[in-house]
Image (cartoon, grey):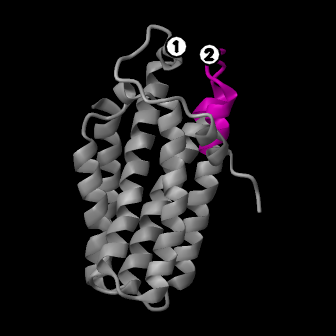
Amino acid sequence: MRLRFCSMLNMNKAPAMTKAPRTDPANSLPLWLLADMRSDHAGELGAVKIYEGILFASKNPAVREFAAEHLATEREHLASIEALLAPWHRSRLQWPWQWAGWLIGALPAAINGQWVFATIATVETFVDQHYAEQIERLETTRVEQIPEHITQLLQLCRADEVQHRQDAEEQLSAPLSPALRAWLKVVEWGSRGAVVVARAI
């Protein structure tokens, strides 16, 4: 079992603060990176709620096992990003991200496992692309104040999301219905829109 960088960050997590210190290290990061990380935090917050929504609505043992396993990983991602991104740098729209995530998990789970796995595969395909774009920009940008561990964290979180997508795709056993395909388009475009908003607010 590989040692998770995300878990290591949590062990050194500083106590929560209610006021931004003048020496906040994130203040030295480029604005585009702060915006990217704000969208990452919103995405991981939503991901946690997706799996919580699945567990709330599904009675299927296989679906519940799948959701519980991946929920643990998403909680690690969220905690790791929160260890790097102070509350005042996060999206101010956390309630909408949580409710949207919960509904994206609960609604398919109330239908059947096929809808759950197809939804997760679609979400994780988008997240993979989202992290890949950020990692490429970090690797091609020569800015001294960007800590290397930020790139490492995004790389490891991306690897987990790719695994989640593959796990979901392996569970798909039938052609997607027109209704499911329409739902997946809503999920995909909703994810894209959420990133744009979270980067700004």
What residue would you read off at disc 2? 145
- x, y percent for residue 159: 64, 55
Lower position in the chain sequence, tag 1 or tag 2: 1
Q: Is residue 132 magenta?
A: no
Q: Secondary structure at mark 1?
A: helix
Q: In the rendered view, would you say 140 is above or below 195?
A: above
Q: Position of residue 198 (x, y in %)?
A: 32, 38
The magenta stretch is 137-154
- Which image quarter holds the N terminus? bottom right
Q: Quadrant of the C terminus?
A: top left
Give the camera-side residue of 62 and 154: 62
Q: Residue at left 59%, top 61%?
A: 162
- Label 1 Cα neighbours within 10 Å, binned few <14 / some 14-19 / many ≥20: few
Task: Classify mark 2: helix, strand or loop.
Answer: loop
Q: CA distance from mark 1 to mark 2?
A: 7 Å
What is the number of the mark on residue 114? Answer: none
The reply to whether the C-beta atoms of the residues labelled 1 and 2 are less than 8 Å apart is: yes
Q: Residue at x 53, y 29 (%)?
A: 14
- Left or right: where does residue 45 sit relative to residue 12? left
Q: Is residue 182 visible?
A: no
The residue most toward the bottom is 174
Question: In the shown orientation, is residue 49 left or right of residue 142?
Answer: left
Q: Nearer the viewer, residue 56 or 138?
A: 56
Residue identified by numbered label 1? 28
